Amino acid sequence: MEKRDYLALRRKTQVPLWGDVSLRILVLTALIGAVILIHWFDRDGLVDNYDGHVSFLDVVYFTMISITTTGFGDIAPVSDRSRLFEAVIVTPIRIAVLFIFIGTAYQYVIRRSWERFVMKRLQKQLDGHIVVCGFGTSGSEAVRELLARGEPASNIVVVERSLEALALAEEMGCLVLDADATRDETLMNVRVSRASAVIISAGRDDTSILIGLTVRHLAKDVPISMVVRAVDNELLARQAGATQVINPVSFTGLLLAGSVKGPHTAEYLADLASVTGRVALTEHVVAMEDVGKGLRDLPGRMILRLYRDGRPIGFWEEAAQRLQEGDILVEVVPGQDARAG
């Protein structure tokens, strides 16, 4: 699969910025100092074409000119030993110094400028996208299901701290952000206020709830689906702004209980939840040509429930016998396996 650009903020290293810069300066100083000592020790092998005398200042000058590969020619090695030192010892040190200079420039100037440019370019494209906070087992499966349902990978942004998880998300074609999803800056960088939906599966209930609070603070109307594992936290998740709260432990219990009563119940429920099975659930607004009809007046369609003003109405209820504009229908349709067959 074609690699995509990272929507990237770099993870903080164990060494702070000032420590990293100080370490580089220390290494550079040590290398340059070593070359100065070598040249001073072998100063008799150098010739100064200006005054014929090689002083310590001349050695420092020649070292800096030599390290930067400028080479004016006013001071030059003339003895065989000096030239051997230049070729065998000084040249490798010169290359190392250049790599440190170039590496530092790339690390702190070129790469960060490029990443800011890429970030801004990708941010302009983010509109109506899906933000996935957490790419563990639940988050990655959610993305796989979204892709199976036809969602473009380029429309999914994964926020995660694990580099392995980010690499997997990138392989799937998603945009990825290496950052802390509990921070306002992170969610603003992925333009959460313009997202069509947010999926939160941080692995810890407290972290997921904190992310939910942050998302709701920045985007008051965006739908939020949140995974929590403790029943006691489901209410807290809703109070944090979650539109839908999914408890995988409870759902697993439902499947296990269903399997006791019938060997195919759990299989059907799992099949129903995935678009890749023989059946699938869809949710859509009632079509204008169906307004005024009852669910029984839609032959060949299996509509299990409708939602009116946020209230669920079963297919057997009287209110379901006259559809109204804006009703949302939950319908069972053939899955990908059935259509392929």
Image (cartoon, rainbow, N blue to C red):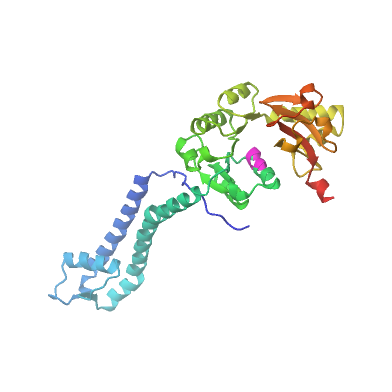
Above-or-below relation of 293 to 81: above
Residue 282 seen anywhere in this rendered image of the structure: no
Above-or-below relation of 154 to 296: below
Q: Position of residue 169 (x, y in %)?
A: 60, 48
Residue 199 in the figure: left or right of residue 278:
left
Residue 108 in the figure: left or right of residue 290:
left
Along the viewing direction, whichever of 308 and 196 lies nearer the viewer: 308
Q: Magenta: predominant secondary structure element?
A: helix
Which quadrant of the view contains residue 315? top right
Which quadrant of the view contains residue 106? bottom left
Residue 113 in the figure: left or right of residue 230:
left
Residue displayed at 30% across by 76% down: 83
Q: Position of residue 280 (x, y in %)?
A: 77, 39
Is residue 236 highlighted in magenta?
Answer: no
Which quadrant of the view contains residue 301? top right
Above-or-below relation of 310 to 80: above
Above-or-below relation of 74 to 171: below
Number of marks in the rendered image: 0
Q: Residue furthest left?
A: 51
Magenta segment range? 137-142
Along the viewing direction, whichever of 319 and 47 lies nearer the viewer: 319
Residue displayed at 72% across by 25% down: 312
Residue displayed at 49% across by 47% down: 123
Q: Position of residue 63 (x, y in %)?
A: 25, 66
Q: Position of residue 175 (x, y in %)?
A: 56, 48
Residue displayed at 15% across by 67% down: 55
